[in-house]
Image: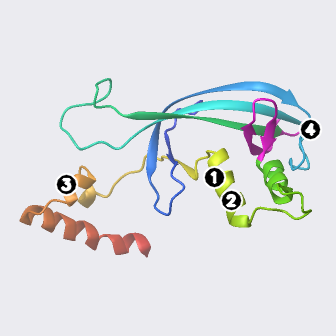
């Protein structure tokens, strides 16, 4: 935000990557505390953060702008996490958190608790790794990845490709553009 750069999130934990452009966010520091277990070794304090992130959802292509209309679809997710800083105030780490309405737990703490969970009292853990993983995915809603969008110059021969939709039609002109576009891809690989 301070650099005025856009970025996208992969917010779906599935196999496919779905990049969602971030539209807005609001962050607040909830508290500051001593570094928790699992924090970076050089961390001297830990800021507990809450950030609400809003991104745009997919819509059908249309000619008219949709910003501020009923066609605009967005989703907001709240993320809890720590930011670990060293004595100079530089960020050296951080951890995702879960709020159980009394305590903020790190992912590591929750994983360790689940690994030892003994519901039936037989002194043996009850949950498999897959069951623990499923619970972690349910309790920690975290983006899979984030990418900063760099504005780059497109080669002249790519300038007339206005959107992905101009490449998926079935007409002769569209196919010609698609073949020309795909023919340039090996240049990027070399």
x, y percentage for residue 15? 50, 63
Residue drawn at (77%, 44%) of the image: 94
- Compared with 154, 83 (above or below) is above
Q: Distance between the residues labelled 4 and 3?
A: 53 Å
Mark nearest the camera among 4 and 2 is 2
Q: Are marks 2 and 3 in contact (CB under 8 Å)?
A: no
Mark 4 Cα-neighbour bin, 10 Å: few <14, some 14–19, many ≥20 = some
The stretch in magenta equals 85-106
Mark nearest the camera among 2 and 3 is 2
Q: Quarter of the image holding residue 133?
A: bottom right
- Report which residue position mark 2 lands on: 133
- Report which residue position mark 1 lands on: 137
Q: Do the residues labelled 1 and 2 touch (CB within 8 Å)?
A: yes
**Along the viewing direction, whichever of 2 and 10 lies nearer the viewer:** 10
* Among numbered discs 4 and 2, the one appearing first in the sequence: 4
Q: Can residue 88 be seen in this view?
A: no
Q: Are marks 4 and 3 in contact (CB under 8 Å)?
A: no
* Among numbered discs 4 and 3, the one appearing first in the sequence: 4
* Among numbered discs 1 and 4, the one appearing first in the sequence: 4
Label 3 element class: helix
x, y percentage for residue 26? 59, 26
Query: Is residue 186 found left or right of 77 in the rendered image?
Result: left
* Among numbered discs 2 and 3, the one appearing first in the sequence: 2
Q: Are marks 4 and 2 in contact (CB under 8 Å)?
A: no
Q: Quarter of the image holding residue 158?
A: bottom left
Label 4 element class: loop
Q: In which quarter of the image is the C terminus?
A: bottom left
Q: In which quarter of the image is the N terminus?
A: top right
- Report which residue position mark 4 lands on: 44
Q: Does the magenta stretch include residue 78?
A: no
- Compared with 166, 185 (above or below) is below
């Amino acid at each position: 935000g301070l650099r005025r750069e856009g970025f996208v999130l992969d917010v779906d934990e599935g196999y496919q990557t779905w990049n969602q452009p971030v539209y807005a966010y609001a962050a607040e520091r909830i508290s500051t505390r001593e570094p928790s277990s699992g924090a970076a070794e050089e961390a001297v304090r830990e800021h507990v953060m809450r950030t609400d992130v809003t991104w745009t959802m997919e819509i059908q292509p249309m000619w008219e702008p949709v910003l501020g209309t009923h066609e605009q679809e967005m989703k907001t997710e709240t993320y809890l996490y720590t930011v670990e800083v060293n004595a100079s105030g530089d960020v050296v780490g951080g951890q995702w958190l879960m709020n159980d309405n009394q305590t903020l737990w790190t992912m590591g703490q929750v994983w360790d608790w689940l690994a030892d969970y003994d519901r039936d009292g037989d002194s043996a853990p009850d949950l498999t790794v897959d069951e623990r993983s499923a619970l972690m995915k349910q309790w920690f809603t975290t983006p899979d990845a984030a990418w900063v969008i760099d504005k780059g110059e497109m080669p002249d021969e790519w300038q007339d490709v206005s959107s992905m939709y101009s490449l998926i039609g079935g007409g002769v002109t569209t196919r010609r553009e698609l073949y020309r576009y795909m023919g340039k891809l090996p240049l990027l690989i070399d």
